Amino acid sequence: MIKWTNFILNSIKTKLMGEIATSDRQITLFYSSKSKRAKQTLAYAKSEGWPVQEIDILKTPPTGTQIAELADRLGIEVKDLVNQNHPAYTSKFEPHEFSSEDWIKMIRHNPEIMKQPIALRGKITILVETPTDILRI
C-alpha cells in the first residue's frame, strides 16, 4: 500500500512540476555511461552520501519533454544542449540552425550528442563541467 501511495504522489508531483520529478533528498543525474567525466561525477555524488537516481541517456534516451525541461531548468535554449563538437555530431551533421523541435528530435535519436552530465536536486539544476561541480548541488 505504501509503494502504491508513493507512486500516486510522485505521479501527481510530476504532473504539477513537469515531467522530471526531483527531490531535495536525492540527486537525479542524466549522464552517458561512456563518459569518463560522468562516471567521476557519479562517484563524487555517491561519496558524499547522496542517493542518486541514475538516468543513462544511452540506455534510456530522454523524452522530448524532458529535453525541453532540462534546457529550461538550465536557462538555455535546446540547441545549447547539443555538443556540436562531439564526434557523433560532426560525423552526421554540419553546423546548422534548426528549430527547437528539430534539435529535440536530433537529441532523441542521437542521445550521445547531448551535453552531460546534468544534475538535479530539488529546484537546482547544473550542467556538470568538472566532476567536483556536483558538490555545489
Image (spheres, grey):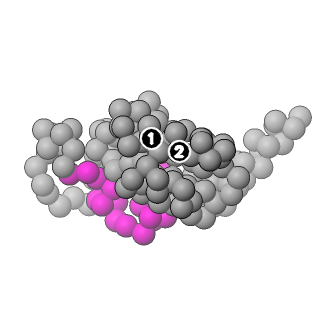
The residue drawn where x is 34% and y is 50% is 115
Q: Is residue 55 left or right of residue 32?
A: right
Looking at the rendering, which quadrant does residue 79 occupy?
Answer: bottom left
Q: Is residue 119 left or right of residue 27?
A: left
- Up-down relation of residue 42 to residue 19 (above or below): above
Other residues around mark 1 within 10 Å, as few (<14) / some (14–19) / many (≥20):
some
Image marks 1 and 2: residues in contact by CB distance under 8 Å = yes
The residue drawn where x is 52% and y is 39% is 43
* Residue 63 placement (x, y as % from top left): 45, 45
Q: Which residues are magenta?
A: 66-84
Majority secondary structure of magenta residues? helix
Given the image, on which type of amino acid does mark 2 rest?
Tyr
Question: In the displayed image of the protein, which residue is found farthest to the right?
Answer: 1
Question: In the displayed image of the protein, which residue is found farthest to the top?
Answer: 59
Decide which of 80, 128 is in the foreground and name it: 128
- The residue tagged 2 is 44
Given the image, on which type of amino acid does mark 1 rest?
Gln
* Residue 27 placement (x, y as % from top left): 60, 49
The circle drawn on residue 40 is 1
Decide which of 83, 128 is in the foreground and name it: 128
Decide which of 82, 127 is in the foreground and name it: 127
- Up-down relation of residue 88 to residue 16 (above or below): above
Q: Is residue 9 left or right of residue 122?
A: right
Question: In the displayed image of the protein, which residue is found farthest to the left?
Answer: 94
Instruction: Check disc 1 and report its element: helix, strand or loop.
Output: helix
Q: Give how far apart the Cα atoms at labels 1 and 2 are.
A: 6 Å
The residue drawn where x is 81% and y is 37% is 4
The residue drawn where x is 60% and y is 42% is 47
